[in-house]
Image (spheres, helix red, strand yellow):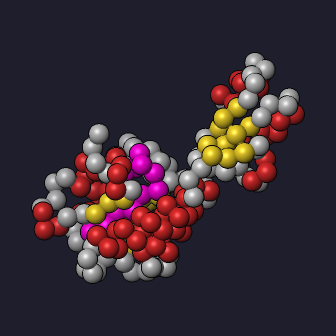
């Protein structure tokens, strides 16, 4: 809606941060039809040439680094992983998810993954999803999130665990309270 408003008011350009890039196709076309530059932040547009440019992290590499870090943090213990993903089919989410699997060295169907939920990058949805997994699988020792907000939201649900049941979460910088 903000992008549509920007086009209607004749702005000088538009910066978009799409959760699901393909949903913005019409708005991007209208902006470009009015010769407004469109730049994507964090997630590339779909198709990639729909916008004029993208400022983003290499999300697949970020996922790989997260997976490798979590694997190392477990110190050789058998992994029991819960994955809190973002928007199903979303570019950033898919790239982070696939990168995590590659970095951890597992496949989508690996038995180490004991739970998964789509929390849409929403800090409020993560704490609602995680307790059910922790109750069903008290031996969970790794948490993957595709968004910083999900990591922040999940963090309070991990607090009541005893020290011997420590849960490693990533992105690590986001799992700490601010």
Q: Is 173 covered by the magenta stretch?
A: no
Q: Say which residue appears at 28% left-offset and 56% top-offset.
A: 131
Q: Say which residue appears at 48% left-offset and 68% top-offset.
A: 64
Q: Position of residue 148 (x, y in %)?
A: 42, 49
Q: Is residue 126 visible?
A: no
- The number of discs equals 0
Q: Say which residue appears at 12% left-offset and 63% top-offset.
A: 163
On screen, residue 115 versus residue 109, left or right, reads left
Query: What is the span of residues highlighted in magenta in the rendered image?
Result: 140-151
Snapshot quadrant of residue 141: bottom left
Snapshot quadrant of residue 4: top right
Q: Is residue 17 visible?
A: yes
Snapshot quadrant of residue 79: bottom left
Quarter of the image that includes the N terminus: top right
Q: Who is closer to the viewer here, 115 or 68?
A: 68
Quarter of the image that includes the C terminus: top left
On screen, residue 94 versus residue 170, left or right, reads right
Q: Is 145 covered by the magenta stretch?
A: yes
Q: Position of residue 108 (x, y in %)?
A: 50, 76
Q: Say which residue appears at 44% left-offset and 44% top-offset.
A: 122
Q: Up-down: is 140 above or below 123?
A: below
On screen, residue 161 versus residue 131, left or right, reads left
On screen, residue 170 versus residue 53, left or right, reads left
Q: Who is closer to the viewer here, 125 or 158?
A: 158
Q: Residue furthest top?
A: 9
């Amino acid at each position: 809606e903000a992008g549509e408003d920007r086009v209607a008011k004749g702005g000088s350009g538009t910066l978009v941060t799409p959760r699901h890039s393909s949903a913005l196709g019409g708005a991007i076309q209208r902006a470009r039809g009015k010769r407004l530059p469109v730049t994507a932040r964090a997630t590339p547009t779909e198709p990639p040439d729909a916008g004029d440019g993208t400022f983003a992290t290499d999300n697949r590499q970020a996922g790989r680094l997260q997976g490798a870090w979590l694997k190392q943090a477990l110190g050789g213990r058998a992994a029991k992983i819960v994955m809190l993903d973002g928007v199903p089919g979303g570019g950033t989410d898919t790239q982070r998810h696939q990168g995590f699997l590659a970095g951890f060295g597992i496949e989508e169907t690996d038995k180490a993954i004991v739970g998964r939920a789509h929390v849409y990058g929403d800090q409020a949805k993560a704490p609602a999803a995680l307790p059910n997994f922790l109750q069903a699988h008290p031996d969970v020792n790794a948490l993957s999130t595709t968004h910083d907000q999900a990591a922040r939201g999940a963090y309070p649900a991990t607090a009541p665990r005893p020290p011997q049941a420590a849960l490693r979460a990533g992105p690590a910088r986001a799992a700490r309270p601010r």
